[in-house]
Amino acid sequence: MPDDILIDIKGLKTYFFLDEGTVKAVDGVDFTVKRSKTLGLVGESGCGKSVTAFSILQLVSPPGKIVEGQVLLHRRASQNGSLSQATEIIDIAALDAGSRRVRDIRGKEISMIFQEPMASLSMMHKVGDQIVEGILLHTDMTKEQARARAIEMLGLVGIPQPELRVDDYAFNLSGGMRQRVMIAMALSCNPSLLIADEPTTALDVTTQAQILELMLSLQQEFGMAIMMITHDLGVIAEICDEVVVMYLGEVVERADVDSLFHDPKHPYTQALLKSIPRLGFSRQGRLDPIEGFVPDPYNRPAGCPFHPRCTQMIPGKCDSDHPDLIILPDGRAVRCVLYEKEG
Amino acid sequence: MTTDAPATLTPQTANPKFEETVSSVSVASQWQLMWWKFRRHKLAMAGGVVTIIIYLIALFTEFLSPWPGHVTISANHTYAPPQPLHLFLQTPEGTRFLPHVNGYKIEIDREALRRSFVVDEEAVVEVGFFVESWDYELLGLFPTNIHLIGPKNPAEPMYLLGADKQGRDLFSRLISGTRVSMSIGLVGVAVSFVLGILLGGISGFYGGTIDNIIQRVIEFIRSIPTIPLWMGLAAALPQTWSSLQIYFAITIILALRAWTGLARVVRGRFLSLRTEDFVLAARLDGSSELRTIWKHMVPSFFSHIIASLTLAVPGIILAETALSFLGLGLRPPVISWGVLLQEAQNIRTVATAPWLLIPGLAVVVAVLAMNFLGDGLRDAADPYNR
Amino acid sequence: MNNDNNALLEVKGLKKHFPINRGFFQREVGRVKAVDEVSFFVKSGETLGLVGESGCGKTTTGRCIVRAYEPTAGQINYVNHRGQQVDLARLDNRELKPYRRELRMIFQDPHSSLNPRMTVLDIVGDPLKVNKIASGKELEDRVATLLRRVGLRPEFMRRYPHAFSGGQRQRIGVARALALDPRLVVADEAVSALDVSVQAQILNLLKDLQAEFNLTYIFIAHDLSVVEYIADRVAVMYVGKLVELAETEELFNNPKHPYTEALLSAVPKPDPRLRSQRIILEGDVPDPANPPSGCYFHPRCRYAKDRCVTETPELRDIGGGHTVSCHYAEELSLRGISALVQTS
């Protein structure tokens, strides 16, 4: 339903113009994020998932540049707490990166949390002050109101004694705590989309479980959409509703989470699922690795980007023709010539 | 950067579709990578070129000087102004290619009761290239008497940059001074190199109390104001020492402080390298401490050392210039830029013979060039972008 | 050491404490008990997995075993190729040298474990040079053989590490570890820094090499699914202590320590149909410089009783080689992953 769409990305291309050559980090990406749902963006190094996230928020700095495409934000005005029908569609990619309109969206409509909380939390300021700063930027609250809201947020993310922790500095807190503070900061202005870029990769597995649980419960409470960027298929399976698989800057498969794991269509997805050890099944037989390695971004293979490593490659076709993204009848999408007939 | 052909042997790679493009980057040693990175830094390249030129001048001073630097060409021509070199002569017949300078005529200022030289447009002193003049040994080995430039008639004075108060040619003295000023930098840096690597290495490698002690000593040395320190040490040098002895004494004095900067760099590098896995791997191979340092750690920071050394040289040049300018460093008959500047110390001289300040310009050019070069080297020193 | 178990290595009461120094004179104000009395043995030819989260001491244990660190206390009893038992913890540098050939290490970070300024030939050949095993042409041949064994083309030996991908660099690291024909290899998070699809390549390589050369592995990791695949027995560590050790299948299906249960439950499974009720632990991993009293896990344990606050549990054998350090191991019935196997 078109009403459900929050972010619609069409043909996004973000290139990095370096001395050594041009890196096509994102090369024609299409997908949508639905309101209040969780989208997983999964891929290995060099696939462009982080750059996609940065492009959505116009955070790509030179020598990188969005060269083509649209990032359409379906913004709904809300009056008196109820959502009106009027939807304003803004193309973030068309806005100037430093403009007021973009800064209005960043932190307010769309927030982001990162893998390394220490990289985004300042050591020199109290954590409470950092949250308050964001609130003051985007709302009309007074300083006292903002501080109260900050304490409320810290409590919501599960930090014990928030009224005391609000005056702590980041280095006083553990990794899990810092990540919670980041989440509190990101949600303080009630965004409609939270982009999480590998938020749990640097955490211990028990802490990761806590944070994922927290994100899901906050989603229940606030109703925001989540875009979860990760390379960990387990995390995807645990919390996502829909999944987009990326490889070398392109979308190779799009599906709902159950279909992706139980009926993967793209050879890369299939190979990926076969190559990861699964708890409970590992003792049965060998892992099936994907041979070869992710190509050098300056030397992209001709034709299909995955063909050099594909066990189902068709010589003469896959190595010369670049496959289109085929939309299947059930709404799924696959970029592979094997499905040409079905689309 | 990786090559696009996989190095792993798999059924896929047996496919002839995989062409081996051996990228030259993959076999590039650290020095090649450094060179490529350095090349992109235009200012540093320019600095490098200028530095090389200056050192070439230092090597070939006698060839480039029209006159021996310590000799009075003409006692009558004290404080003679510079005679710019002209390549073409305007004659009634037209313009002729005839390198020359204009001679002098004496002007008497009756009001100030001063006698001064003024360039006489009429007088033409022909100048030749590769002329025969005074004897010397090229590079200390080949006796010859060819010089790059000089008056065709050696009896005529030619002061391209003017004369000093004893009628000596500033141009020649400037060129002669290049050798001393630039070499003192190298010698000083060599001394501080040894001290810096040794003490910095011990400090960084062993850590703990030794590191503590050495660092405090370094800080103490650095906290002493330099000019008074050098002045004190220089004043303590016996007057009876020969120029050469004084030269080396001065370099040691200057190196006594310069080593501290290098020691810190070396220590920092050791500290960061100590935690690298590949150093641990070398130790686990059974490599002795000394071998680990020499084979595994030193190559990692050698480029940084070169950069630091290059940046240390201008400091020493400036220091020597300052000391000699104050009369406490090298003294005549040794010629260095500082010594030359010493003669330009009073206002009257500067007012009447401002060309005597040109050695200062030479110092500026040399120091700037080496600073740019050193900056470029330091940026290129770690070509791995990590 | 009673060697009924055909053990190659036995760690007994191993301790490694790091002093915390403060002030101008670097006085010791406390100690980080990174490894706090750990005991286990490794059978010849098996793979022992060592798992735990940050601060548990698994990496420190591994480094003590290869004597990258000097243990604060305890024994590291190793059976050398002549069948003699030797306590590695007591040897000095000179005596250790021959053992450095038999116990080798593979490192985690493919970027910092290879010297960027040395060629692959230098890197893999250096152990051979140091131990005066080969030089010149013979060295090159040996290195070529090693590279081929780990699946790399020997022509690439003149290249520098920056020319290789992460997975290839790990292979170089494996080749370096094998260069001296070791008997025991400690793999310290050897696949953790690699892309998911490449991890499987390296894991398979390690398995093949183990079969070919009869190697014994101590595989340190935080990823339980990886450990389940490669290890024969698994030891779980928490804040410097060993809390449970058992054969892999037994540990994963029938955990006896609440921490192991929580750990297994927390691992996200790559199957959306297995979104089971997970055990979410409260609180954070404790600071090893200031661990809780009694059983270190008690503040986060849902089964904790009074005894757990005051008394530190002993590591005891509850049958079949399954050892656990929990006061209530026999009484608790904890969930393993067997529940998951049934739903598939």
Image (tube, coloured by chain):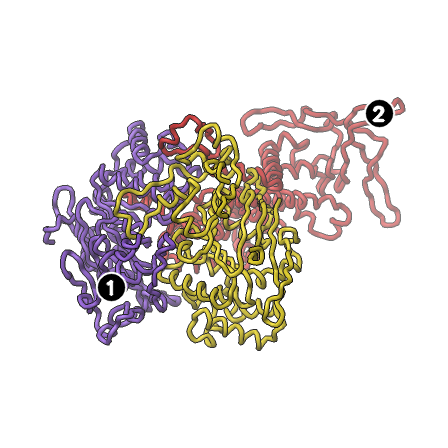
Chain colours: A yellow, B red, C purple
Residue occupying image coordinates x 75% and y 41%: B78
Image location of residue C12, percent across then percent down: 18, 57
- The residue pinned by badge 2 equals B95
Q: Nearer the viewer, mark 1 or mark 2?
A: 1
Task: List the residue tagged with mark 1.
Answer: C334
Q: Which mark is residue B262?
A: none
Nearer the observer, C132 or B115: C132
Q: Which residue lies furthest to the right in this view?
A: B92
* Mark 2 residue element: strand
Subunit of label 1: C
Q: What residue type is labelled 2?
A: Thr
Q: Left or right: where does residue C155 sit relative to residue A327?
A: left
Residue located farthest toward the top when viewing the structure as drawn: B93
Q: Distance between the residues labelled 1 and 2?
A: 107 Å
**Residue B118 lies in quadrant:** top right
> x, y percentage for residue B343?
68, 47
Q: Nearer the viewer, residue A103 or C141?
A: A103
Q: Is mark 1 on a helix, strand or loop?
A: loop
Pick the residue in front: C241 or C199: C199
- The subunit carrying tag 2 is B
Q: Does residue C5 sit above or below B176 in this rendering?
A: below
Is residue B223 visible in the rendered image? The answer is no
Mark 1 closeness class: few <14, some 14–19, many ≥20 residues within 10 Å: some
Asked whether the residues under the numbered discs 1 and 2 touch, taking CB atoms below 8 Å apart as contact, a structural biologist would say no
Number of residues whose C-alpha sits closer than 10 Å to that of mark 2, classed few (under 14), some (14–19) or many (20 or more) = few
Q: Which residue is depicted at the point 40% across and 27% down?
A: B15
User: How many callouts does the rendering have?
Assistant: 2
Q: In this view, does C30 lie above or below C40?
A: below
Expressed as whole percent of the image width and height from the top left, the position of residue B374 reads 55, 44
**Camera-nearest residue between C99 and A99:** A99
Q: As shown in the figure, which amino acid type bears the numbered disc 1?
A: Leu
